Image (cartoon, helix red, strand yellow):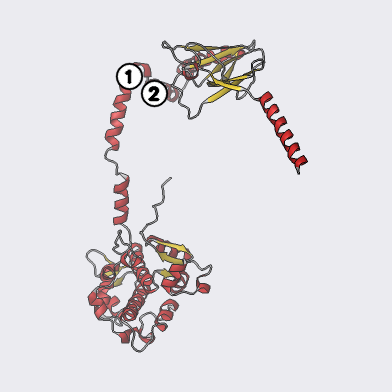
């Protein structure tokens, strides 16, 4: 054991001696003003020869450190000229600083100081004369072409040349105040444009959905029932009317299944209300089936004679339009959308705000994608319900697994309007 400890102490002593040999003193250098120092340079394309000399240039009048001064560096060879482009016009505003360490082998001392970073561009000397004459040659070419057009061109060509001459704008002769005038004109014209908040408010007011409560804290508060079915209409719906054989529209699998789940002899108050809503949804489905073209009001009323008079009159007044000077009523696409969104809002209430839109789409003979758009216009999302939403809607885990439903969540969020390209 003692032999092992002695070997360990010897190894530690050797490590200390090696560390002393390789350790160095570090000092931070502060460069004096007007004195250049080391710098970093980035050459994106062409690298200069190793013996190419570079010189710094600056127009600073005050004493400024080289790393923070507005400076450029330049160098050249026989064929190429190099010049920096990033630190000569604006105050350098970088989020980091570069440091360079220089080690003196004789004193084993390392000096660290800040260094600026230059981005270097290059210019081929042989091409400078060609690029300088491009603008003048172009102007001379246009002038010669116009002279030929005036001398030998057709009447239409000469008119086009004179029109182009009149439309030329001499920017130098306009003066410095033109930019201010244009800016004022732009501001005066754009001041009348609607702001983002005004556009969103207008879009909300024009939505083809029932009246809603934007500040609702629960899904039940989003679309209050009294904004869809009036108290007078609810009072005309007796429990006898909610039986399967008495429903106005009997070909809806979704309505029939929901009625069958609520067939107790003495339903609770909540179930009685849901049965009345199911009857009203059935009446709306029947109304949509009948009102597909222009029809006389009296004729439409006869086709709706199975409905209570209050409900029939309400559906006709809210979801049809009357031609001026005529007694005929018509269901327009906008009115049909309003009818469907009112019915789907009731469907969400019956299903505790998680509705299988695929079944309703089949009942109405509509594509699922069209019905998804209608549910989204109500603020719904098409997604698999969460565990809490499954419990609230009375769904078991197998029913909700990988089954996307139309779910109304709060806070209420309508889909953004499509952007025009």
Q: Nearer the viewer, residue 60 or 406?
A: 60
Residue 408: x %, y % from top left: 39, 64
Q: Specify few, some or many for label 2: CA neighbours under 10 Å numbering under 14, 14-19, or 20 or more.
A: few
- Which of disc 2 and disc 1 is earlier in sequence? 2
**Disc 2 on helix, strand or loop?**
helix
Can residue 8 be seen? yes
The answer to whether 138 is drawn above or below residue 242 in the figure is: above
Quadrant of residue 6 within the rendered picture: top right
Name of the residue lying farthest toward the bottom: 265
Residue 102: x %, y % from top left: 61, 19
Residue at image mark 1: 176
| Mark pair 1, 2: CA separation | 26 Å
Please state, as top left, top right, bottom left or bottom right, where the N terminus lies in the image. top right
Q: Nearer the viewer, residue 350 or 192?
A: 350
The answer to whether 108 is drawn above or below residue 364 in the figure is: above
Quadrant of residue 361 within the rendered picture: bottom left
Residue 224: x %, y % from top left: 29, 68
Q: Is residue 354 left or right of residue 301?
A: right
**Disc 1 on helix, strand or loop?**
loop
Q: Nearer the viewer, residue 375 or 68?
A: 68
Residue 163, label in figure: 2
Q: Can you tell which of label 1 and label 2 is closer to the viewer?
A: 1
Q: Nearer the viewer, residue 161 or 183?
A: 183
Quadrant of residue 76 within the rendered picture: top right
Please state, as top left, top right, bottom left or bottom right, where the C terminus lies in the image. top left
């Amino acid at each position: 054991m003692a032999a092992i400890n002695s070997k360990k102490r010897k190894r530690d002593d050797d490590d200390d001696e090696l560390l002393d040999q390789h350790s160095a003193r570090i000092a931070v250098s502060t460069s004096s003003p007007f004195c250049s120092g080391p710098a970093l340079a980035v050459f994106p394309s062409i690298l200069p020869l190793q013996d190419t000399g570079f010189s710094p240039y600056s127009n600073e009048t005050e004493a400024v450190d080289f790393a923070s001064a507005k400076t450029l560096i330049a160098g050249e060879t026989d064929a190429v000229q190099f010049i920096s482009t990033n630190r000569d016009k604006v105050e350098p505003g970088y989020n980091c600083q570069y440091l360079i360490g220089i080690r003196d082998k004789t004193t084993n001392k390392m000096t660290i100081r800040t260094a600026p970073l230059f981005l270097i561009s290059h210019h081929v000397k042989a091409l400078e004369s060609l690029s300088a004459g491009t603008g003048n040659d172009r102007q001379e070419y246009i002038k010669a072409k116009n002279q030929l057009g005036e001398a030998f061109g057709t009447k239409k060509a000469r008119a086009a040349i004179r029109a182009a001459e009149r439309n030329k704008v001499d920017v130098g002769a306009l003066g410095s105040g033109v930019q201010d005038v244009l800016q004022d004109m732009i501001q005066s014209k754009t001041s009348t444009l609607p702001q983002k908040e005004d556009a969103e408010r207008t879009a909300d007011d024009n939505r083809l959905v029932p009246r809603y409560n934007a500040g609702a804290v629960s899904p039940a508060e989003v679309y209050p029932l009294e904004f869809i079915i009036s108290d007078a209409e609810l009072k005309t719906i007796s429990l006898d009317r909610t039986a399967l054989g008495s429903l106005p529209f009997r070909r809806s699998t979704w309505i029939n299944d929901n009625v069958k789940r609520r067939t107790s002899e003495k339903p609770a108050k909540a179930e009685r209300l849901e049965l009345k809503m199911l009857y009203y949804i059935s009446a709306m489905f029947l109304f949509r089936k009948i009102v597909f073209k222009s029809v006389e009001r009296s004729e439409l009323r006869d086709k709706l004679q199975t409905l209570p008079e209050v409900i029939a009159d309400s559906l006709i007044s809210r979801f049809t339009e009357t031609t001026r000077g005529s007694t005929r009523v018509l269901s327009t696409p906008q009115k049909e959308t309003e009818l469907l969104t009112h019915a789907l809002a009731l469907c969400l209430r019956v299903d505790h705000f998680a509705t299988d839109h695929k079944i309703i789409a089949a009942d109405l003979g509509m594509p699922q994608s069209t019905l998804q758009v209608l549910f989204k216009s109500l603020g719904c999302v098409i997604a698999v319900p969460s565990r809490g939403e499954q419990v609230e809607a009375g769904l078991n885990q197998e029913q909700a697994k990988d089954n996307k439903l139309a779910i109304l969540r709060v806070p209420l969020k309508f889909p953004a309007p499509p952007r025009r390209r």
